[in-house]
């Protein structure tokens, strides 16, 4: 099964090399690697030029100004040719060399599944795990109770993007939530949970910036419910806040 892995980045040369290395170490070789760079000036383009030779024509990259992270992700989706698409951003790395094998096996073993998702580990600047995002299988109405898949582990069949659309850039930093809400809760795609830690995510990004980020994204999530004409219960802010702690396993 061919997988499309998309990395979006901007002035990320210090962390991007680790992301690229974790992809090169994968045992599963039926993949394409797409990098969408926002016209970086810190050496990112030179790094991409150098790394291209190690991918045996399976790497493509573009470097041009974009309108933000999700605009860049949509550019990647437009280029993707794999049956399944996922994102590994410049602050993220795969947990081990068999991650893509695990994703391929889960989708092959569950042909009814349109997407899979798993657990992630948050790491600090020293590479030490500080907490874990422990996911679980989707149940109807789970989004209203504060649940969502860990987007860095969300690998979805390309046909879903073609049928139900791409990222809504007007949703701001909650665009990944809005897309998964639309796919899973509104259009009822089938998902399968992989009970493993597949991705290490560096703390400090747009979605891991602390309490202010939680409050901002809660408001944006509520807007996503309304945009998709899905009821959002009055207790959603509290449910989301509690759910974040319930799925976090602090080290």
Image (spheres, rainbow, N blue to C red):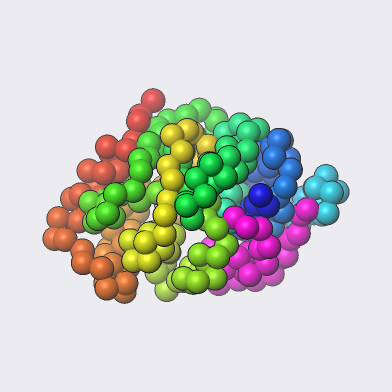
Q: Quadrant of the C terminus?
A: top left
Q: In the rendered view, would you say 31 is above or below 26?
A: below
Residue 122 or residue 235, whichever sits in front: 235
Q: In the rendered view, would you say 139 is above or below 219?
A: above
Q: In the rendered view, would you say 215 is above or below 71?
A: above
As drawn, the residue found furthest toward the top would be: 251
Q: How many marks?
A: 0
> Residue 97: x and y, percent?
65, 33
> Residue 48: x and y, percent?
77, 53
Q: Which residues are magenta?
A: 58-84
Tell me: 110 left or right of 30: left
Residue 180 appears anywhere in the view: no
Q: What residue is rendered at 50% in x and 28% in y? A: 128
> Residue 19: x and y, percent?
65, 43
Within the image, what quadrant is residue 9 found in? Answer: bottom right
Residue 46 or residue 176, whichever sits in front: 176
Residue 228 appears anywhere in the view: yes
Q: What residue is rendered at 55% in x and 30% in y? A: 126
Magenta stretch: residue 75 in it?
yes
Tell me: 220 left or right of 78: left
């Amino acid at each position: 099964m061919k997988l499309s892995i998309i990395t979006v980045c901007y002035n990320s040369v210090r962390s991007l090399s680790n992301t690229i290395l974790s992809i090169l170490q994968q045992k599963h070789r039926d993949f394409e690697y797409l990098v969408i760079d926002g016209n970086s000036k810190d050496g990112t383009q030179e790094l991409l030029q150098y790394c291209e030779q190690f991918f045996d024509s399976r790497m493509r990259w573009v470097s041009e100004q974009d309108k933000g992270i999700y605009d860049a992700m949509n550019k990647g989706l437009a280029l993707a040719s794999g049956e399944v698409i996922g994102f590994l951003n410049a602050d993220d790395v795969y947990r081990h060399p068999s991650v893509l094998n695990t994703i391929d096996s889960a989708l092959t073993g569950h042909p009814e599944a349109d997407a899979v998702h798993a657990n992630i580990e948050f790491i600090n600047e020293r590479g030490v795990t500080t907490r874990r995002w422990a996911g679980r299988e989707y149940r109807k109405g789970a989004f209203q109770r504060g649940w969502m898949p860990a987007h860095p582990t969300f690998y979805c069949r390309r046909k879903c993007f073609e049928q139900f659309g791409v990222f809504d850039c007007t949703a701001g930093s909650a665009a990944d939530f809005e897309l998964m809400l639309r796919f899973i809760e509104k259009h009822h795609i089938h998902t399968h949970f992989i009970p493993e830690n597949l991705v290490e995510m560096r703390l400090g990004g747009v979605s891991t910036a602390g309490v202010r980020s939680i409050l901002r994204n809660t408001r944006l999530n509520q807007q996503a419910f309304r945009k998709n004409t899905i009821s959002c219960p009055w207790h959603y802010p509290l449910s989301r806040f509690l759910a974040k702690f319930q799925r976090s396993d602090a080290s």
